[in-house]
Image: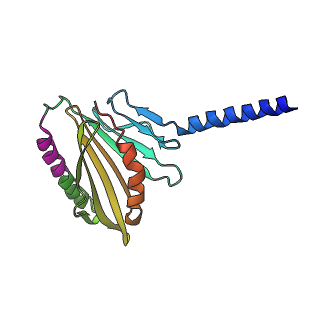
Amino acid sequence: MRALFAKILSAVLICLTTSTLAYSQTNEYRDSESGVSLSLPPGWKWSRPERLGDQESILFLKEPGTLQIVRLYVKVLQPPENMMPAEKMNRRLLKQAKRKVEQRTKEGYENYRLRENSCQLKAINGRSALSWVADYTQNGRNMAEYFTRLRSENANALFYTRLPAEQLDDFKARIDPIIETLQLP
């Protein structure tokens, strides 16, 4: 009887260990056309990239539970840009954030504006990156759009998502670790 109990207990422990390892692993996304890759936590889903043109695509990422959608826009640069100093790339990223505000305003977003002091320059996997927040109003509700743009000499990538402003900080804590895994060619 003890031997049977020991075998059952061993089997249960093996099953628990195996299932824990399986659920702690991440999902790897790789786009063979653009050369972009990233890691997603268990439960996150992605769509097949929607090709917008010859060198452009959008990937839709969906968080489990909340079903919050994050878009990843990627443009492969043809021809590739010359390497440039980080300071010059950072200035370019800041200009692109301002252009995004102009674009959204033209698209008709109500009260669309760059959140003061939200621009954060950083490096992600050796690439220049900028995160920022824009605020706007939708049907009387305060909304936020969160962006992170990465650049390399070969590609331009932009993560963005829209959500109620009060949910932004919690969501940033969940999405930023994913953004940090992005690899550009």
Image quadrant in which the N terminus is located: top right
Q: Quadrant of the C terminus?
A: top left
On screen, residue 69 versus residue 53, left or right, reads: right
* Vertical order, 51 against 113 (above or below): above
Query: Where is residue 172 drawn, in percent x and y?
Result: 38, 54
Question: What is the span of residues highlighted in magenta in the rendered image?
Answer: 84-96
Image coordinates of residue 18 in percent, x first then y, are 62, 33
* Secondary structure mostly taken by the magenta-highlighted segment of the chain: helix
Residue at point 52%, 41% (across, down): 42
Quick one: which residue is furthest to the right in this view? 1
Q: Is residue 30 on the magenta stretch?
A: no
Q: Nearer the viewer, residue 112 or 159?
A: 159
Splitting the image into 4 quarters, where does residue 165 fall?
A: bottom left
Does the stretch in magenta take in 91?
yes
Is 115 on the left or on the right of 82, as rendered?
right
Reply above or below: 67 against 73. Answer: below
Residue at horizontal 18 percent and vertical 53 percent from the top: 99
Give the farthest residue toward the bottom: 140
Q: Where is residue 134? Give x, y as percent.
A: 28, 60
**Position of residue 123 measured from the top left corner of the image (x, y, whole percent):** 25, 42
Q: Residue at x 23, y 55 (%)?
A: 119
Name which residue lies at 42% across and 34% down. Answer: 29
